[in-house]
Image (cartoon, helix red, strand yellow):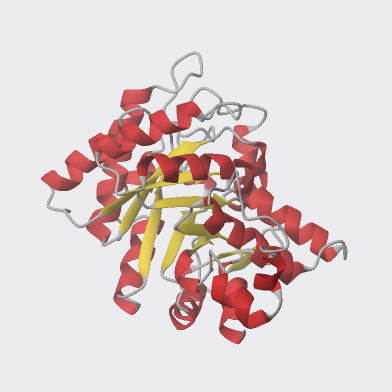
């Protein structure tokens, strides 16, 4: 039997396999577990300091002491990885973002503490300069405002090494500079960090869905009306994503990512079908905010759309999802 010529009705009644819960469970093609989730968190300096992000209901910037109970909850729920994003003090931001290289900076200190307290919890760090630059771009600018690729890559290599020295498990370059995966992999090998994994933001699109994230890391004001079109991918392109993934894998990436998530599920499927490597998707801040807003207005059932959206990533071929829903989803799965 071929899909184009199935056994006809009534010999074939597809609804037989939907008749009851046990049958639906038995034949389900894709499932979601807490092990499929990575939880992105926002950290800032201070003690007992929690600042809500209004455009991301339920998401807060946390000081390290308040992050530790969150990490403990992730361990308890079976969420395997925390992904760290910094919101640093404005006075530390410079045109070249060199605070990213500070071994005693916010992210290295958080990494060291997390690995000390929860050695079996995976820690992933963002490798990019936008939280550290005074202009909000992901790299060093020339006199015209264009991102200088190779100078930026040099700083990114130093940032990745700083995180690796602190004990991070996974570095995730999200900048979309050319050649940065190969440069980072070479430096990690040279410094003996042979076990540090690279999850490359290989297909990161110049999307309008990132707005709430920029609120969370305090970069929206610095970026102003500027965009990132000269380095992030054109939303109209699909074949280009495959070329980017192929380059990153050739340069030493262990895992690849598509970002944003749901508007780009076709890209997730193409990447998984073409390369058959660990493939991740980022359910970004705008996706999260939309579902939260619709649920708050009573237009959608919060838990049902949350779980349906996350399952869609698995169905599209993602091995895991970075999502701000991770804890809520894991709780629901544990209860269910």
Image point (38%, 58%), residue name: 124
Does residue 118 lie above or below 176 as drawn?
below
Q: Is residue 258 visible?
A: yes
Q: How many numbered badges does the structure rendering display?
A: 0
Question: Between 259 and 139, which is closer to the camera in this rendering?
Answer: 259
Q: Position of residue 277 (x, y in %)?
A: 35, 49
Direction from residue 209 to residue 84 in the image, left or right: left
Image point (62%, 43%), residue name: 210
The quarter of the picture where the C terminus appears is bottom right
The image quarter containing residue 13 is: bottom right
Question: Between 105 and 232, which is closer to the camera in this rendering?
Answer: 232
Direction from residue 6 to residue 100 in the image, left or right: left
Q: Position of residue 65 (x, y in %)?
A: 47, 75
Does residue 301 lie above or below 244 as drawn?
below
Q: Position of residue 178 (x, y in %)?
A: 35, 27
Q: Is residue 55 visible?
A: no
Question: Between 238 and 210, which is closer to the camera in this rendering?
Answer: 238
Does residue 63 lie above or below 78 as drawn?
above
Image point (35%, 77%), residue name: 118
Does residue 229 lie above or below 322 as drawn?
above
Image point (66%, 62%), residue name: 12
Question: Between 105 and 17, which is closer to the camera in this rendering?
Answer: 17
Q: Position of residue 167 (x, y in %)?
A: 26, 62
What is the residue that sits farthest to the right in this orientation?
298
């Amino acid at each position: 039997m071929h899909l184009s010529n199935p056994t006809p009705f009534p010999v074939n009644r597809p609804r037989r396999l939907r008749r009851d819960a046990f049958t639906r469970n038995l034949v389900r093609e894709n499932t979601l577990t807490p092990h499929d989730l990575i939880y992105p968190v926002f950290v800032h300096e201070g003690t007992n300091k929690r600042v809500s992000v209004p455009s991301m209901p339920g998401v807060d910037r946390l000081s390290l002491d308040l992050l530790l109970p969150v990490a403990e909850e992730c361990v308890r729920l079976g969420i395997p990885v925390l992904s760290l994003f910094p919101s640093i003090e404005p006075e530390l931001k410079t045109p070249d973002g060199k605070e990213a290289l500070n071994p005693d900076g916010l992210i290295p200190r958080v990494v060291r503490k997390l690995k000390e307290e929860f050695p079996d919890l995976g820690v992933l760090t963002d490798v990019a300069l936008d939280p550290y630059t005074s202009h909000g771009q992901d790299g060093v600018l020339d006199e015209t405002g264009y991102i200088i690729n190779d100078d930026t890559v040099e700083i990114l290599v130093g940032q990745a090494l700083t995180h690796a020295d602190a004990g991070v498990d996974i570095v995730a370059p999200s900048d979309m500079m050319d050649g940065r995966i190969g440069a980072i992999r070479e430096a990690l090998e040279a410094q003996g960090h042979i076990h540090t994994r690279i999850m490359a933001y290989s297909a990161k699109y110049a999307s309008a869905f990132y707005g709430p994230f920029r609120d969370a890391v305090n970069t929206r004001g610095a970026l102003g009306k500027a965009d990132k079109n000269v380095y992030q991918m054109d939303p109209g392109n699909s074949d280009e994503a495959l070329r980017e993934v192929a380059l990153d894998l050739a340069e030493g990436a262990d895992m690849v990512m598509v970002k944003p998530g749901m508007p780009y599920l076709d890209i997730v499927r193409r990447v998984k079908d073409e390369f058959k490597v660990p493939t991740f998707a980022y359910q970004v801040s705008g996706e999260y905010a939309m579902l939260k807003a619709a649920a708050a207005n009573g237009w959608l059932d919060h838990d049902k759309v949350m779980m349906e959206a996350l399952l869609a990533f698995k169905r599209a071929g993602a091995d895991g999802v970075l999502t701000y829903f991770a804890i809520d989803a894991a709780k629901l799965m544990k209860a269910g």
